[in-house]
Every structure is written in C-alpha cells, then in structure tokens.
Amino acid sequence: MQKITALTREQLAVCREELAAAYDKLAARGLALDMSRGKPGPDQLALSAELLDALLSPDDPKTVKGFDVRNYGLPEGIPEARALFGGLLDMPADQVVAGGNSSLNMMFDYVATAYAKGVCGHPAWAGQQVKFLCPVPGYDRHFSLTEFFGIGMIPVKMDENGPDMDEVERLAADPAVKGIWCVPAYSNPTGIVYSDAVVERLAALNAAAPDFRIMWDCAYIVHHLTDTPPALKNLYKAAAAYGKEDQVIMFGSTSKITFAGAGLAALAASPANIADIKKRIAMQTIGPDKVNMLRHVRFFGDADGVRAHMKLHKEILAPKFDLVCQMLEQNLGGKGIASWVCPQGGYFVSVELLPGTAARVVKLVKEAGMVMTGAGATWPYGKDPADSNLRIAPTFPPLDELKAAMELFCVAVELAAVEKLMDG
C-alpha cells in the first residue's frame, strides 16, 4: 500500500476529493455518537445488578466482627473492604484505607492536604514552588487536578516500557519536584504496562524533595483483555527494599468494575503515610459509606472474586477492542499517517496521527455527529505540542455504533492528513 505521505500533489488532490465525498456520506447518516470518556457500557453495569441486593436483609447489616455498618465509625473503612483492596493491590490490609466511590477524590484530598498541612511532618506546599512530573500521553484528570492547585507540570515522554526514567531521575533532582503521576498497568491512554526495570528505577528514585510522592494510580490493574495478561512488579515492595516506601501512594477503585458512580475506592501506603492520612480522615468524616462497602464485600467475597468478575467484563470488551484495532489496520495501516498499539487491557486505544492534525480530526468527527476526547487532553494544560495524539474510548457504545464511529474516525484521519500535506 502506498503511503499517503509519498503521494504527489496531484494525487493528494484526487484523494482529498474522494475522502471528502466519503466523509459527506458518513456525515449524512445523522450520527449521534459519544466516544469522549471511558465509561462502562450498560451491559457491563448489568453484570453487577445483584450488588443492589447483596445485603439481603436489614437484619444482617454487620461486619464479621459485629460492627453495624449503618452507624458512625471506622473512618478508614470496614476491615473486610480494606482486605479486599489489599488483595487487589498486593498490600497488607492494615496499610489500606477504603473510601467512597472515587479514587480521584482520594488523590485530590492527598494533594490538598500536602498543600494545607504538609505530609508526614514535612512543610506545607503552600508558599513553595511545586512541580509534578507528568508522563505523556497521560490521564487528563490527573493533569486538571494538578493545574487546579497551581502545580507546575513537566511532561515526560512515555515509551513501551513506561516513562523515560533518565528524564525522571534528572528532573527529580530538583527539590521543587514533589511527585509524579503514574498509571502503571494499562496506562491511560497508551495501554502499556510499566516494565520491571522502570518500576525498579522508580522504587530506587533519589528524589531531592523529602516529601516526593509517586502517585501510583492502579485504575486498570484487573482490566485485562487477554487470558495471559502481563504482570506488574509491586512498586511498594521494591521501594521498601531501598528504604523508600514512604514515596509510594497507591490508589484503586471498583468504579469500572461494579457501578462507575457507586463503587468503592482505596488508598494504600506505608505505615507512616497511613497514620498521617488517618489523622486527616478523622477530621474529615465520621465514617464513609460502610453499607456500600459491606455490599461489595458480600458480592465479591475477596480479591479472587473480583478477578473472576472481570473475566465477564473481558468477554464484553475484548470484541470492541478487537474491532477498533482491525478497523485501524484495515483503513490506516501502512499509509504513514497513524500509529497505535493494541493494548492487552485497560480502557483506551491511543493513536498518534500526522503532526498538526489531531484537532482537525476532532473537529471533523464532531461536525459529523461524534464527540471524542479533545485534542491535547492527554497532555498538561491541554496542549499537545505536536497536535498528534488522540484517545479512542471503545467501551461504552455497542458494536454497531462503535463500527460506525471507527468508519468516521478513519476517514477523518485520512482527510485531515491529506489537507495537512497539501497545505504544507
């Protein structure tokens, strides 16, 4: 197949006419597609329908040790929920705090506490110059949270192994750098899993700031699309071997496992960090939603129950990701204008386009009836310097709508590339 980038100007003009006609035909369908967020589809949410009845009766609202979950108390969460997340994160239950439905909320609270009071006895970040390392392409909500607090964001390029560790080690020598965001398993949006070597170097990181934190967002650690998923090395255990366990703050949730708006979240960390966090929680709440915690524990039983449940998700999601990758290959493969990696898990497919075309693709698909995550969203401040990365979120639409969306996307990518080449 001849690369579009190798076409003559005359050939590009013919190609543009053909693509414009194909685009107009697709736009005339009157599509109304939403591919903007990685939301579970209705069929995924239905997998957890029995969760609503998991307490069975009002006569049985107590934990194994007899605590009535309807009442105040246990601000760190019920022991069973802490154990459930301990099994998922491979951490001791007493080093886990279970919370409400949002791990992002727990991340926000941690950063807010660092600003207002400092963490583990270190000075408050307020009044200091504070920076965070941001692997790119990365998670837009990490970046918006960081920007909200006025923290400077430093992009660090990602490859198939994780963030560029030479850059991370160099930048962490600045005492103003207080942390790094990481989605280590099925990274958002690239879908890569951090290699053992990258995890080991993060574990051994000699950060200049004594309150430097690796914000380890385990959002997709059980969201596999294959039966032989890659393994992720345990960062906390590796860091503890270097005496750096206080640098690690791990997060997880069931938001894309049960109900996205009514799941559980958790934080896991060193004993020193947990003691510090519990002081804050004691001022923040008299207790989280323990009814929902007990409901989840009874629904799953333990971490293995969660893993078994995720196999049901895989059966729904794997065909969608297969369709996306097949259509990308069929329509854009070998044309020299797009590259991608088909992930083994997670919620997204990251596509690198011809530089200078991502925003145009988003505009084209929107005008034809499809909403995507905005160009630049996977970079700090919403500014992708190459205007090249887009995130495809295949999970929510049914297969027929996803097929229509990918037809439109592929035509828009080609059309935007041809326009760019002719203008350039």
Image (spheres, grey):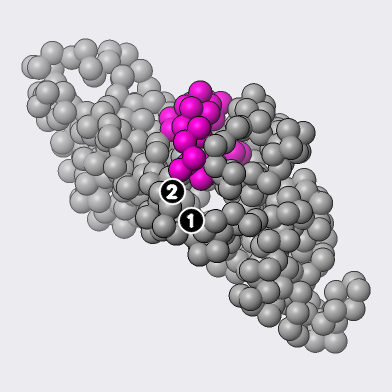
* Residue plotted at (65% across, 56% down): 120
* Residue plotted at (64% across, 69% down): 280
Q: Are marks 2 and 1 in contact (CB under 8 Å)?
A: yes
Quarter of the rendering containing residue 415: top left
Taking the view exactly as shown, the residue that stands out farthest to the right is 65
Near-viewer residue (182 or 273) = 273
- Stretch in magenta: 156-185
Q: Position of residue 396 (x, y in %)?
A: 48, 54
Near-viewer residue (12 or 249) = 249
Total numbered labels placed on residues in the image:
2
Near-viewer residue (11 or 38) = 38
Quadrant housing the N terminus: top left
Q: Which amino acid is tagged 1? A: Trp
Write down the residue under mark 2.
130
Near-viewer residue (252 or 389) = 252
Quick one: label 2, few (<14), some, or many (20+) residues within 10 Å?
A: some
Quarter of the rendering containing residue 74: bottom right
Q: Position of residue 4 (x, y in %)?
A: 24, 19
Write down the residue under mark 1.
125
**Residue 343 visible, this angle:** no
Q: Position of residue 34 (x, y in %)?
A: 37, 55
Q: Please tell me which of labels 2 and 1 falls first in the chain.
A: 1
- Secondary structure of residue under mark 1: loop
